[in-house]
Image: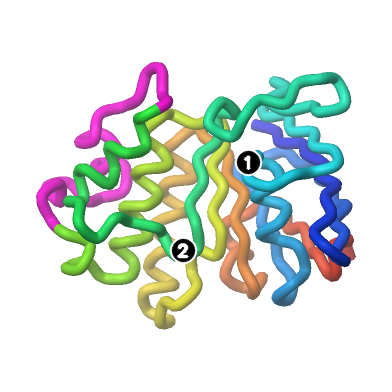
């Protein structure tokens, strides 16, 4: 597997210019708050205006704005897991996961997605009855449902206590080795992703360090 990207974006006085060319299944983005990690993910995903974006996964160009390849967010083939999960509290787990299929051509079933995240039988549960780690895994199942070419995880360990954080890291390791989908994982702490990512990209003030 291989992953290559470059993002240039400006938001007010903040400018981001970062690139990565990495083999393997996982890249970690680390750095202090305000370094540009989430901006980079959002730029790749097409969620914010950018000056230039290039994204290639396994030698296939998904985005290359300089060459006119600039699909809208829903057509980029990316799965995005927001820091807060963004589950709908009034919907069941199954309905939350199914929401990920609305633009997919050949999505997997809800049962398949929940099996991937070790939450079989959770279809009728409500988000209010889940632990923090379980809610993150439901959000990941929703992102996996459309069979994305790349999974983007924004601070998946934020707000979890040490035991749940370590459990989620171990679970993501298993997912990384089971699902043939590369991932980019954002974290404030490179210790969280040291075992998970083959490549670590450190950002500070919008630049690689």
Q: Which residue is mark 1?
A: 45
Is residue 182 shown left or right of residue 203? left
Which residue is pictured at 64% across the width and 31% down the height? 1
Reply yes or no: does residue 64 show up in magenta: no
Nearest-to-viewer mark from 1 and 2: 1
In this view, the residue farthest toward the bottom is 161
Reply yes or no: does residue 108 show up in magenta: yes
Is residue 55 shown left or right of residue 197? right
Which residue is pictured at 58% across the width and 45% down the height? 183
The x, y position of residue 202, in whole percent, is 79, 64
Main secondary structure type of the part rendered in magenta: loop
Q: Secondary structure at mark 2?
A: helix
Bounds of the magenta span? 103-125
Q: CB under 8 Å between callouts 1 and 2? A: no
Q: Nearer the viewer, residue 13 or 22?
A: 13
The x, y position of residue 142, in whole percent, is 36, 43
């Amino acid at each position: 597997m291989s992953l290559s990207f470059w993002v240039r974006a400006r938001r007010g006085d903040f400018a981001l210019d970062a690139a990565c060319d990495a083999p393997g299944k996982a890249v970690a983005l680390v750095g202090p708050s305000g370094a540009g990690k989430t901006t980079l993910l959002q730029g790749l995903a097409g969620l914010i205006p950018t000056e230039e974006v290039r994204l290639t996964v396994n030698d296939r160009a998904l985005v290359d704005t300089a060459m006119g390849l600039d699909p809208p967010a829903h057509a980029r083939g990316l799965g995005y897991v927001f820091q807060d999960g963004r589950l709908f509290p009034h919907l069941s787990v199954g309905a939350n996961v199914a929401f990920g299929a609305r633009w997919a051509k050949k999505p997997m079933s809800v049962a398949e997605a929940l099996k991937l995240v070790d939450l079989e039988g959770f279809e009728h549960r409500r988000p209010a009855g889940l632990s923090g780690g379980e809610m993150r895994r439901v959000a990941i199942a929703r992102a996996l449902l459309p069979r994305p070419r790349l999974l983007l995880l924004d601070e998946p360990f934020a707000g979890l206590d040490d035991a749940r954080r370590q459990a989620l890291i171990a679970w993501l390791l298993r997912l990384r080795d089971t699902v043939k989908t590369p991932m980019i994982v954002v974290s404030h702490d490179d210790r969280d992703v040291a075992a998970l990512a083959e490549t670590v990209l450190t950002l500070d003030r919008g630049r690689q360090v």
